[in-house]
Amino acid sequence: MVKIATIGGGSSYTPELMEGFIKRYDELPVKEIWLVDIEEGREKLEIVGAMAQRMWDASPYDVKVHMTLDREEALKDADFVTTQFRVGLLNARIKDERIPFSYGILGQETNGPGGMFKAFRTVPIILDIVEDMKRLCPNAWLINFANPSGMVTEAVLRYGKWDKVIGLCNVPVMAKMTEHIMLDVPQEDLIYKFAGVNHFHWHRVADKHGNDVTPQIIDKLYEEDNGLPKNIHGVPFYKEQLLQMNMIPCGYHQYYYRSEEMLAHGIEEFETVGTRGQQVKALEEELFDLYKDPELNSKPKQLEERGGAYYSDAACETIVSIYANKNTEIVVSTRNDGAVPDLPDDCAVEVTAYLGGQGARNVAFGPLPTAEKGWLQVMKAMELLTIEAAVMGDYATALQAFTINPLVPSGATAKRVMDELFIAHKNHLPQFSDTIARLEKEGITIKDDIARELSV
């Protein structure tokens, strides 16, 4: 019988996870699920934990959901550990968005300055969790959904020295769920190959006879629903560009291929309805009001608006595939091992893989076209610098990461944004305490209006 520990158990996504385990119980005999959170998340943990138990009670299965603030208690003898936590909660995300936007720079959860600062906060925590796992559940698999998922996976492999880790994202799942409909064929009749890094990947598609149908899907993208996640504003890619590369970029490429339009849209929301983090905060309040209903024992439809549709199809199927050695095809972040020859073998990539008892067996993608190869190598360099800065607490390395990030215009303004983000997040960046003390001594402060708004 299987024990699962979920770090960040008070997340609004937890019902999605429970639904996935219930659907797969015949393949994965779960005995107990431990939902772990921190003191600041206690109320949400209790609400979503009670709902999770109602979901199991409404099923035919006898599964106990435990709620705790004691991570070690939850990790003891766990078979699988899933991570979906957000350091600093949604208020941290809102800071990551509004401070850059106030200077005309993209504020986004996993891209640009916000993505790097989320990594600065998250990487030390995931490495602490890995050290706990080495003591308390040395045979467990770590299944990570915490963003930035690719950088978190890279940190676990490179600095945590923990090979039993799989990073996940629902974006590839959404592509596979929508594109077969565009071609009016069953999903199982299409053969997918993904390559890149998390939130920066491309894919090609063949039919069951091996014929490349990527150009047909590209044509359909300009006629049908483009399959973008709910959290990405839709700006069409240039069709000529996609046909030239003969690959389909993920939705997050809009931030790079259509930077001007995406930035303009982000600034418009910043000045009117609020950033995506502020919108999600309102949505989460609605979700948790629903979760409080003692009669609710199934995932509400509103959760799909949160941006995590098909989360359980990625997370739960990965766990089942490892547990039962199913060798299911899933897109994951894992060690490259030659699948993408344009990147080093020892770095984390997001690729198509077959998941079984030994983890991921990658499908080789082959070399990328010239432009995409250049993009990918720059992005991986930025990721490695960001992770190094997060681990070492080194300001100069953080500045290098900012300078090389394609979404951060280099110069005095970008450095000012970085310095203000350090001040804004000082309670969650102990490794940068000396840097933050120096910045405060130098008189670095957040703009008055933004500071009041964020209560910094």
Image: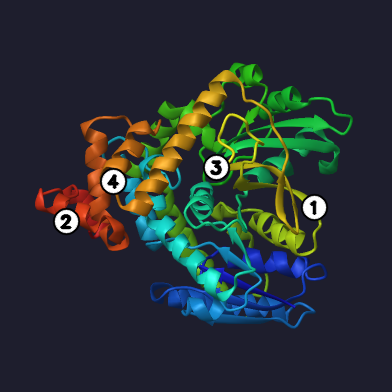
Quadrant position of the C terminus in the picture: bottom left
- Dot 4 and dot 1 residues touching (CB under 8 Å): no
Q: Secondary structure at mark 1?
A: loop
Q: Secondary structure at mark 3?
A: loop
Residue 17 sits in which quadrant? bottom right
Colour theme: rainbow
Q: CA distance from mark 2 to mark 3?
A: 33 Å
Q: Which residue is painted at 73% across and 39% down in the image?
A: 363
Residue 46 is tagged as none
Who comes first in sequence, dot 1 or dot 2?
1
Name the image quarter holding residue 426.
bottom left
Q: How many marks?
A: 4
Point out which mark residue 437 bears.
Answer: 2
Q: Which residue is mark 3?
A: 347
Label 2 residue SS: helix
Residue 139 sits above or below residue 210 on the image:
below
Q: CA distance from mark 3 to mark 4?
A: 31 Å
Check residue 99 in the rendering and tell me which mark sits there, or answer none.
Answer: 4
Q: Residues within 10 Å of mark 3 (few under 14, many from 20)?
A: many
- Residue type highlighted by circle 2: Ala
Asked whether 253 or 44 is in front, the reply is: 253
Q: Earlier in the sequence, mark 3 or mark 1?
A: 1
**Label 1: which residue?**
327
Nearer the observer, 55 or 204: 204
